[in-house]
Amino acid sequence: MAPFKLDTPNRPSLPSPPRVEILWNDFPYKLSTHIVEAFPFRACPEFEYLQDTKEAHARMQALAVDAKQMRIKIVRENTQAMFRWQEQSVNSTRQGNSNAASDPSQPRLWICLNRYVKNDIERLPRKTQGLTLFLANALGMNKEAWEPFIRCLFKTHPGKDIDEIWAWEPVDSGDSALLNAGNLKYLSNWSDLTNDLLHFFLHYMPSRITSDQLPVHLPRVSSFEYENRVKHGFAERRIIVIGHSYGGSICVPACYTHPQLFTALVLSDPPIIRRGGLNNKEKQTVKSFIQASFARRDGWKTREEALAAFQHSSYSGTWHPDALKQFVDHGLYFRPDTGLVHLKMHPVYEALNMACAWGAMSNIYDIVPDISEKLYIKWVMPDEKNGGGLDVPSGNKLLVKRRPGNTTHVNVADTSHHIPLEKPNEYAREVANTIEQAFATQVPVLARM
C-alpha cells in the first residue's frame, strides 16, 4: 500500500454528539471519537441498483403484517439479485474488466473510531511498550457495543497494562455509515475493508500514545514514518488486533500482508470457510441468514420499543443486557423525516456484505497457514454444543488448527456466535490471557521517558 497524494476533501463533523462524560468513574481512561479517511481506491465501481434495493426494502417494511407472501417475494428477489451482482463483479475482475473507483473526484468515504486512552500516561510506569488494542466489530454492530467487554478487561491484571484501545466501524456500519450516507454506492468487498484497516494503521494511527487530546480528524503521519511502519512496524506500540465475526475475517489479510505491524491476533468465530466446505443444505442455511438480514426491521417509535424487540429476538436475545443497551443507545439513530429510530447500518448493506462474502471466505482460509508465526493467534470460538463456530463442527476444528505454530484456541461455554456480546466477562478473560501469552517473553519497560 504505497503512499499517495490527493487533495484534502471537505471534512465532515462527527455524526453523533461527543460523549464528553468520563467513561467510567472507577477507571483511569478517557474516551474520544475520531474520523479518518477510508482507503480512496475501491475494488468495485459504483453500482446503480443499490438505491432500488433500498427502496424495495422500504416498500417491504411498509407492508401490513399479514402480507407475508409479498414480503417473502421482495426478500427473495432482492437477495437473489445480490448473488448475481457478486458473481458479475467476480467474473468482471477475472476478465480484467474491473473499473475500480479510483477517480479522486469521487465522493470520499470516512471511518469513525473510538479511542480509549489511559489518563496521565506519560507519568505512569509500564510493563510493555505501548500496549494497544484494536477492535474490529461484527457485521451490523457499533463500536460502543464493545464497552461492556472493555470494562471487564480493565478489571483483569493484564488489562491494567493496556495504554490505549481503538474501536473502529467500517464504512457502512455505525457512525461511519452516517458519515457516508448517500455515498455508499459500491458492492461490498472485504478487500476494501482490509485496505481501510491498513490505511488507518499505516497513515493515521498516532506514532506515540499520549493522554493529550487529539483532533477529531486525525492527521496523516509523515512519509518517513509511513516507510518505517512498512519496513519495521511501530517503534513505540505493540498492537493486539481483536476481530469478531467478519471483523476477524478482514483482519486476517492485514496480518498476512503486514505482520510487522502486529503482535497478536484474536479471532472470534470469523466466517472463514474452506473452499467447497458447505454442502447444498448448508448453503441454503447461509442464504436464509442473508434473507433474514435483508428482512430485518429498521424502524421503531422509540429506543425503548426497539430494546424490547431486540430482547425477544433470536438474533440478540442472548446478549448481555449491557451490550444490548449499548447497541440500542448507539447503534440506532433518530431520523426527523420519518419520526422513527433506525439502524445505523441499513439492512440492505448487512445482507449485501454476507452475499458478497462467498469467495472472500475461502480466499482468507487459504492464507491462514502463511501468517507469520511471530504473530500469536488465539481463536475464541463458541461452545462446541452449539457447533463450535460458523462452519460445520469438523470444519471448525480444522480451522483453529490451520496454523499450528504459536496458536491456541478455546471454546467458551454457553455461547453461540456473538461471544463478546453474550459473555463479555468470559471474553475479557480470554483476551487477558492473550496479553499474558503474547508478552510473556517481552523485556519490561520500566518507565516512560
Image (spheres, grey):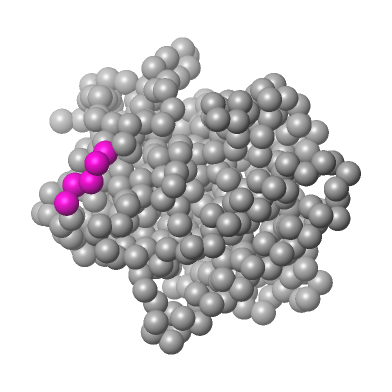
For the question of whether residue 391 can be seen, the reply is no
Q: How many discs appear?
A: 0
Q: Residue at x 73, y 34 (%)?
A: 310
Q: x, y percentage for residue 279?
A: 76, 76
Residue found at the far bottom of this picture? 95
Quarter of the image containing the C terminus?
A: top left
Which one is in front, 382 or 115? 115
Quick check: 133 above or below 139? Answer: above
> Left of 31 or right of it: where is 329?
right
For the question of whether residue 297 can be seen, the reply is yes
Q: x, y percentage for residue 305?
A: 72, 25
Quarter of the image containing the N terminus?
A: bottom left
> Left of 312 or right of it: where is 316?
left
Question: How would you classify the magenta stretch by its main secondary structure?
Answer: loop
Say whether residue 27 is magenta.
Answer: no
**Which residue range is magenta in the image?**
7-11
Image quarter for residue 86? bottom right
Which one is in front, 280 or 44? 44
Q: x, y percentage for residue 373?
A: 42, 65
Q: Residue at x 72, y 74 (%)?
A: 278
Q: Residue at x 18, y 55 (%)?
A: 6
Image quarter for residue 273? bottom right
Residue found at the far top of this picture? 25
Residue found at the far right of this picture? 66
Quick check: 421 above or below 83? Answer: above
Image quarter for residue 430? top right
> Left of 214 or right of it: where is 371?
right
